[in-house]
Amino acid sequence: MAQGAITTEDREFTEEWENIATPQHTIIKFDVRGDLVHELISTRRHFHITTAERKITQDKILLDKNDPFLNGSFRPVVVPDSVNIESNPNALSDDEIKSILVSSAAAWEGWMEVIDSADTLTRMMDLADSVEGVSLKRYKTLGTRLRDVRPKTQLKQKDRKTFEAMR
């Protein structure tokens, strides 16, 4: 996923993001000498990164679905205009989510087709409680969509005796 050339503006603009997901992620930053260093982003916290550092981090990620800047794991707080809903449908601000929750039926259906991040859908469900005018049908749609996109977990039984003892 080539991001293109890094401009002077990319090096100077500092973005602010919030980690809203449970998993830990690593971003690449420049240290004081200009060398690349890795920073672990864990827990729910805000962090700052230049646009150039974000682009370098994104270039190292093989699949878009694993990119925390695109998949909704990181929520944009202060970002350049190039990071918008069209380019990143899972990285929505709280205000954008609130407007989606009360949008028209056609817009709602369109959003439910493009939002595919469990973290973003969980945030939508949390915010739905505080927004007036959100129907129960939409709340149920969010729950269904969340079940559809959440990774499936499967427990494999290895020992029948141990399994029976756990009941």
Image (spheres, grey):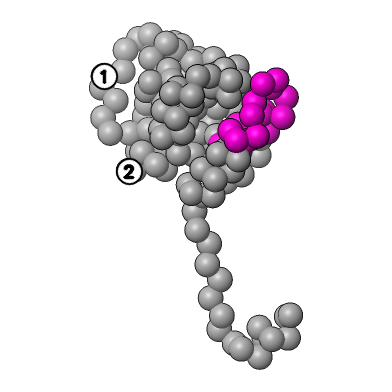
Q: Amino acid at mark 2?
A: Leu
Give the CA separation, mark 1 to mark 2: 19 Å
**Element under disc 1:** loop
Q: Is residue 133 visible?
A: yes
Q: Quadrant of the N terminus?
A: top left
Residue 5's disc number: 1
Q: Is residue 54 left or right of residue 103?
A: left
Please report the residue visible at 29 percent of the width from the left and 25 percent of the height from the top.
Answer: 3
**What stretch of residues is rendered in magenta?**
121-139
Tell whether position 137 is magenta.
yes
Of residue 35 and residue 58, the one placed in the foreground of this image is 58
The x, y position of residue 109, in whole percent, is 45, 30
Q: Is residue 34 visible?
A: no
The x, y position of residue 103, in whole percent, is 53, 19
Q: Which residue extends farthest bottom? A: 161
Of residue 130 and residue 27, the one placed in the foreground of this image is 130
Q: Amino acid at mark 1?
A: Ala
Please name which of the two marks, 1 or 2, marks the residue nearer to the observer: 2
Please report the residue visible at 38 percent of the width from the left and 8 percent of the height from the top.
Answer: 9
**Element under disc 2:** loop
Local packing at callout 2 (Cα closer than 10 Å; few below 14, some 14-19, many 20+) is: few
Local packing at callout 1 (Cα closer than 10 Å; few below 14, some 14-19, many 20+) is: few
Image vertical order of residue 136 relative to residue 13, above or below: below
